Image: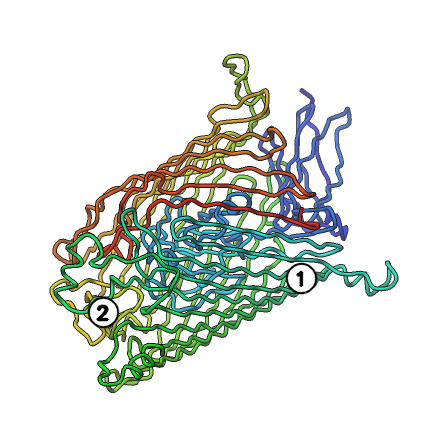
């Protein structure tokens, strides 16, 4: 042990040599830390012979530097941080952007890398279903909406490439129109996020980030193929990307500027036939998709700009057994426990069906002004939805006219949305700086605006046409110290809606204005982080715990939120058959805005061999809007007979807990292979306080557990894994009595297995995996399945995935 020394230095940008303020410098052995000042300088006392410094700053690679102490009283260091980069070979530079960077105390989960690779080809919702707190609201094989702690649809904002997705998301069977192959990472914020993302984010936010555009001398790509046995689905995706191309002299000004340019194009296609329950085909549930995206951008020293376009198109069948001709058949179908008709499996998509397309254009730019960073993003979206009936108005005497009528959509919806977001992030402001500690304040102020038009057409009616405009202004500030983070955010939003009335439905022209405040406050405390030398416990001379330094980190975070949302047009004025869910919906023009008051407490513990997280939450929602079944009065229409649902309000209280664990059970020292165990658990309790009864359509309790074997290499194969998992779902026994058309289905247990690896062949390293879902082919119905009245969910599904990188992407 030495006498007290002083570690001092300056943190700089490795490229521009500029001092960096607000960098966190942490002495791992003693847990003392400091933040670099406005001139990049820091100062730390030390009494160790040797120590490790960890330096972190948003947008830069984390640096760990080992410092050996000499006899001098002061050690001076020159710290150079590089912008976050995934690949340095061929000068591919990518800046890592963190979800909820403005509210760093919030509960965030990221699905990326190999984990996301093993889910390619599935819907956005299915890619998140193994995350604690997430369940699925499913309508057949092609529509799966994520449910966050019991909330979904209009209460969960989906952000695609930085733009909030607007695509008739109010529909229970209207899944986000996003290519499942386009995402490089999916980030999930659980809990209210209305300050950062605007009115409506009561349940949380899902950010879908496409692959970053490469820069420099780079060209590469990746081909992906996925096959599914249950519905005989095939899916293909091809992505190409590159940086600048040299013109003329290598060191010319043109080529120097060209180093900042990059591009990316990607396309995919999926085609599937009918899903299969264990005992029968689920008729007319096939689908087909063609999707694509393109991006082009420039990144300079102080300025960057990127243009992005994506297209999503799909045609999907609606289960024919859910569209029933008369009241007696409807009741008989619900009581039968299986479809009344035996369907032959086919790829054909017949009426009833839907055709959907979604276009997204966006341009975003950033400017470093020295004293802070300006950011702006413009977005344009258009969502087109056409719904085709299997029934129509009785056209008699002319079969040709009847067929022509069925080939035209019964209803069309076209939603066009313009959006503009602008924000300014100020440079870190040093609050105090001492020999042992320091703190800094970071923050953002921003504004957002949106204008949209929804035009309804066709011979049937569900919701009226409308025009809406909204605007918001917000500010968020974060105080950071070596052990403690606190943030506070405030936002004000206003929304104007003009509804075009319908005389045939007795809906008058209506104009409405809604306003509200959102607020969020959070604190996160990081308990002492330290290193311990592993003892090494041997078993049969070949098994031991890792003998490396074990980094431990424990944090406790508390977040409080207040959020709101205005009632949507469908909730106020719907009056007709909701095609995809096969139910008749009735709106309520007297609905008031929802207001949410939430609290979330999260404990996290991370070491090199263990990750554990436990969250508890409570969310009280005033004027909670929900669809309530009218079981005594099914609606008979010329399109058939359908269960009736009406919109109403109550005071709802949602409480619950999420937990996840991932632990290295044992590690083999001879070949570095290991066994891992883990799982997730989710519990939600929804209560209708006003009517003193359970809230309807809340997810059932569930636990997922897995055991996994991993081996770094064997016989020319790399990253080998074998996994077995089980999902246990309880029967939902908390539901209002005598309200729904049937009681919740029984609980169920499903088993999954998967294995895969990377193999080098033909000059590239391709990845493959094979998985079996619902291995035992167990019949089951999930309480949140929109088809649960009529059919079982899908049975066994064997999935084969193949990924082949090429060019510099290898």
Query: Residue at coordinates 47% horizontally, 38% vertically from top-left?
Result: 555
Residue 690 drawn above or below residue 315: above
Query: Residue at coordinates 63% horizontally, 32% vertically from top-left?
Result: 716
> Residue 548: where, in percent of width, then height?
59, 24
Who comes first in sequence, dot 2 or dot 1?
1
Q: On the picture, is 184 further left or further right than 155?
A: right
Task: Find the distance from the CA under tag 2 to the CA under tag 1.
Answer: 47 Å
Which residue is at the front of the view, 38 or 94? 94
Residue on which disc 1 sits: 263
> Residue 590: where, in percent of width, then height?
23, 73
Residue on which disc 2 sits: 584
Q: Quadrant of the N terminus?
A: top right
Residue lying at the far bottom in this picture: please name it.
Answer: 503
In the rendered structure, are the residues bearing label 2 and label 1 in contact, judged by CB atoms less than 8 Å apart? no
Which residue is at the front of the view, 299 or 600? 299
> Residue 76: where, in percent of width, then height?
76, 36
Query: Residue at coordinates 12% horizontally, 56% vertically from top-left?
Result: 738
Q: Secondary structure at mark 1?
A: strand
Q: Is residue 248 visible?
A: yes
Q: Secondary structure at mark 2?
A: strand
Which residue is at the front of the view, 494 or 772? 772
Q: Quadrant of residue 444?
A: bottom right
Q: On the picture, is 2 further left or further right than 759?
A: right
Q: Which label number is shown at residue 18? A: none
């Amino acid at each position: 042990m030495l006498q007290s020394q002083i570690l001092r230095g300056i943190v700089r940008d490795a490229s521009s040599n500029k001092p960096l303020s607000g960098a966190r410098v942490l002495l791992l052995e003693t847990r003392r830390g400091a933040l670099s000042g406005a001139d990049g300088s820091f100062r730390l006392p030390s009494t160790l012979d040797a120590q490790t410094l960890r330096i972190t700053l948003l947008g830069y690679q984390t640096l760990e530097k080992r410092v050996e102490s000499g006899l001098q009283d002061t050690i001076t260091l020159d710290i150079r941080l590089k912008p976050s980069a995934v690949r340095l070979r061929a000068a591919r530079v990518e800046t890592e952007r963190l979800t909820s960077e403005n509210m760093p105390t919030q509960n965030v989960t990221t699905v990326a890398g190999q984990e996301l690779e093993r889910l390619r080809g599935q819907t956005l919702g299915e890619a998140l279903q193994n995350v604690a707190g997430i369940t699925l609201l499913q309508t057949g094989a092609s529509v799966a909406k994520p449910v966050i702690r019991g909330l979904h649809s209009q209460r969960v904002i989906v952000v695609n490439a930085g733009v909030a997705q607007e695509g008739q998301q109010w529909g229970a069977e209207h899944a986000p129109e996003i290519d499942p192959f386009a995402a490089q990472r999916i980030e999930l914020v659980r809990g209210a996020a209305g300050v950062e993302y605007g009115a409506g984010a009561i349940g949380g936010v899902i950010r879908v980030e496409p692959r970053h555009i490469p820069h420099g001398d780079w060209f590469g790509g990746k081909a992906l193929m996925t096959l599914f046995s249950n519905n005989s689905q095939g899916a293909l995706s091809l992505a190409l990307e590159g940086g600048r191309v040299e013109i003329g002299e290598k060191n010319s000004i043109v080529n120097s500027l060209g180093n900042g340019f990059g591009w990316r194009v990607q396309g995919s296609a999926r085609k599937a036939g009918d899903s299969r329950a264990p005992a029968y085909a689920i008729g007319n549930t096939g689908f087909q998709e063609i999707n694509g995206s393109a991006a082009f951008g420039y990144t300079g020293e102080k300025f960057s700009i990127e243009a992005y376009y994506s297209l999503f198109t799909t045609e999907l069948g609606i289960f024919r057994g859910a569209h029933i001709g008369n009241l007696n058949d409807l009741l008989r179908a619900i009581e039968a426990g299986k479809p009344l008709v035996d369907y032959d499996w086919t790829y054909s998509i017949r009426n009833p069906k839907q055709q959907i397309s979604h276009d997204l254009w966006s341009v975003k730019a950033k400017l470093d002004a020295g004293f802070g960073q300006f950011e702006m993003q413009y977005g344009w979206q258009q969502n087109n939805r056409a719904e085709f009936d299997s029934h129509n108005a009785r056209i008699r005497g002319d079969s040709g006219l009847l067929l022509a009528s069925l080939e035209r959509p019964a209803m069309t919806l076209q939603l066009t949305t313009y959006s503009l977001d602008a924000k300014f992030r100020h440079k870190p402001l040093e609050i105090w700086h001492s020999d042992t500690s320091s703190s800094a304040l970071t923050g953002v102020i921003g504004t957002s605006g949106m204008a949209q038009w929804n035009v309804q057409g066709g011979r049937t009616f569900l919701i009226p046409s409308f025009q809406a405009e909204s605007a918001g202004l917000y500010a968020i500030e974060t105080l950071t110290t070596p052990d403690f983070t606190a943030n506070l955010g405030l936002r004000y939003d206003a929304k104007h809606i003009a509804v075009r009335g319908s005389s045939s439905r007795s809906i008058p022209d209506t104009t409405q204005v809604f306003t509200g405040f959102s607020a969020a406050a959070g604190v996160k405390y990081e308990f002492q982080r330290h290193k311990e030398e592993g003892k090494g416990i041997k078993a049969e001379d070949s098994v031991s715990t890792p003998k490396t330094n074990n980094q431990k980190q424990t944090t406790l975070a508390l977040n409080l939120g207040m959020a709101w949302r205005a009632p949507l047009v469908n909730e106020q004025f719907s009056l007709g058959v909701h095609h995809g869910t096969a139910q008749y919906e009735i709106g309520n023009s007297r609905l008031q805005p929802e207001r949410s008051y939430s609290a979330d407490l999260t404990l996290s513990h991370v070491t090199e061999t263990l990750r554990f997280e436990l969250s508890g939450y409570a969310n009280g929602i005033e004027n909670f809007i929900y669809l309530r079944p009218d079981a005594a009065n099914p609606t008979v229409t010329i399109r058939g007979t359908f269960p009736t649902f009406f919109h109403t309000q109550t005071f709802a209280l949602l409480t619950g807990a999420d937990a996840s664990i991932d632990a290295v059970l044992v590690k083999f020292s001879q070949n570095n292979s290991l066994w891992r165990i883990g799982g997730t658990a989710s519990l939600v309790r929804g209560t209708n306080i006003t009517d003193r009864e359970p809230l309807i359509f809340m997810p059932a309790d569930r636990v997922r557990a897995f055991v996994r074997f991993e081996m770094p290499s064997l016989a020319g194969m790399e990253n080998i894994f074998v996994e077995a998992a089980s999902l246990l779902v309880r029967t939902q026994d908390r539901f209002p009595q005598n309200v729904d058309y049937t009681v919740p289905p029984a609980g169920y247990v499903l088993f999954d297995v998967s294995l895969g690896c990377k193999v080098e062949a033909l000059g590239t390293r391709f990845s493959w995996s094979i998985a079996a879902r619902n291995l035992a082919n167990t019949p089951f119905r999930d309480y949140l399945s929109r088809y649960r009245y009529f059919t079982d969910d899908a049975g066994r599904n064997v999935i084969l995935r193949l990924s082949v990188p090429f060019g510099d992407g290898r």
